[in-house]
Image (cartoon, grey):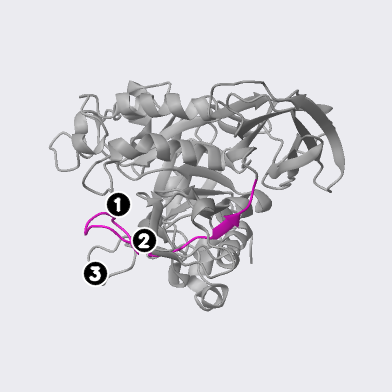
Amino acid sequence: MLVDFEGIMVTGDVWLNGEKIGGTDYGYLGFELDISQLLKYNTDNVLAVRASTGDKGGSRWYTGGGLFRDVHLIVKNDIAIARHGVFVTTPQITEQAARVKVQVELEGIRNKEYPLEIQTAILSPEGKQIAVTKTQTPLRNKLKTVEVTLPVMNVDQPQLWSCETPHLYTAVVTLILDGRPADRVAEKFGIRTIEFDKAFGFKLNGKKVFLKGIANHHDLGAVGAAAHETAIARQMDLLKKFGYNHIRTSHNPYSEAFLRLADEKGILIVDELYDKWSNKDYWPGRKPWTELWPGNLTEWIKRDRNHPSVILWSFGNELQMREDLAGYPTGDWGVTTYQMMNVLARRYDPTRKTTVAMFPARAGGVGKSDKDFNTNIVPPELATVTDVASFNYRWYNYADYLKHAPDMNIYQSEATTNELLAPYFGMDRDKMVGLAYWGAIEYWGESNGWPKKAGLFPSLIMHWSRFHRLTWLKVLLKRLPWFTSG
């Protein structure tokens, strides 16, 4: 039996019947613990959890605290599908057919010769079985977790996932041992193509799409930081009414419920792992960042890689303010750190591009207080090597950046709401990826010292009852090119 915590804010420890069994040093991601040996039968069991928001200064915003995401009890065989062990890709898609590739990670078979069969069925969005495959597992494999790639399946006349038609298929993977089911996992996925290129920015299913989005922290405004599905769905529905198609998860992984809802509602996600790459400042983890990032990145990619809404991985945010915020002391403003992370990310998901959101500093860490900030407009070193060049603000510098690095494909990862339409119209919307307005829907934002719990920017989206009272703001919002609601 396993207990699965989707997250403990910000760090946590777990005891069962008085014995410590584990915990998390970075609570934005989940973990599971095997409690089989410590359970007492025919009596009460006590599972105790201690949560901590960490040291002062470990976060720049309101984090919430405690068990802010779901907890699950999982009962399964020793021979089982591993945690996040089903990976579905669609390597070839045409109007007539889509090829679906499923990889399964197994545990409990190391050095064994079990007669184990993997059966996989694909269900249509309507729930009808449309494809099936079977394969035998390898014998006497020496790895703790064994990856098995199944025969490719074909789906005729695929219903593509998009913002307008978020069709979801289901892969049902069943392990058969001695003729009986030993484990079963059902994983939803979408059939769609994504492309990034400097010539067109971003395409979904071969069609140009400009990201029109928001960037907040993970809280839900006055509702707080707990992952309430109804509150998440309400915000997404409101954003869709306004014509938004995108959310950037600033600056940490959001909840599993958030991504499920994004899949269902057709919202494109830039999925972000960290704020800074630091062992000290702005780091809420209990252990050094350099010690935790490989495990965190693996859990994050494997957790989120089947979601069709996720189109881009973002490893971090605003790194080039100081050299010590860019990971390892390699003297290249985080380029080597990014390349290390990128190799690991592609190990678990070769289908998506990667990026890092850059603070408005120039090459060499030249910041706004430096005298040549507005004359020597050269893009940060890291932005020139990432798959997608992400910049927070400074939209009026993008043309100058491209003079120095013409191969960059630019995404405005944060845009100020108090500039209204300028960040949107200031971009080359034919060739760039899109933008995400900072704080564009209710959220608590940077604290800037207790007890302040508010952002510094006006919100573009408000509760409908309040919105209708502020008729002057309604007039301004109607000028947004993607505004559709009355």
Nearer-N-terminus badge (1/2): 2
Q: Could you tell me which residue is drawn at 35 percent across and 49 percent down?
A: 25
**Looking at the picture, how far across and down is residue 169, in whole percent?**
75, 42
**Looking at the picture, how far across and down is residue 55, in whole percent?**
23, 57
Q: Which mark is residue 450?
A: 3
Q: Amino acid at mark 3?
A: Trp
Cβ atoms at labels 3 and 2 below 8 Å apart: no
* Comparing labels 3 and 2, the label whose residue is closer to the camera: 2
Q: CA distance from mark 1 to mark 2?
A: 10 Å
Q: CA distance from mark 3 to mark 2?
A: 13 Å
Q: Which mark is residue 155?
A: none
Majority secondary structure of magenta residues: loop
436 or 347, nearer to the observer: 347
**Looking at the picture, how far across and down is residue 205, in whole percent?**
68, 33
Lateral position of residue 317 relative to residue 281, left or right: right
226 or 249, nearer to the observer: 226
Cβ atoms at labels 1 and 2 below 8 Å apart: yes
* Comparing labels 1 and 3, the label whose residue is closer to the camera: 1
User: Which segment is the magenta one?
Assistant: 50-76
Q: Magenta span has 75?
A: yes
On the question of residue 119 being in view, the answer is yes
- 323, above or below 94, in the image: below
Q: Quadrant of the C terminus?
A: bottom right
Residue on which disc 1 sits: 284
- 430, above or below 472, in the image: above
Lateral position of residue 234 relative to residue 16, left or right: right
- 358, above or below 454, in the image: above
Residue on which disc 2 sits: 63
Q: Could you tell me which residue is drawn at 77 percent across and 41 percent down?
A: 181
Q: Amino acid at mark 2?
A: Thr
Q: Magenta span has 208?
A: no
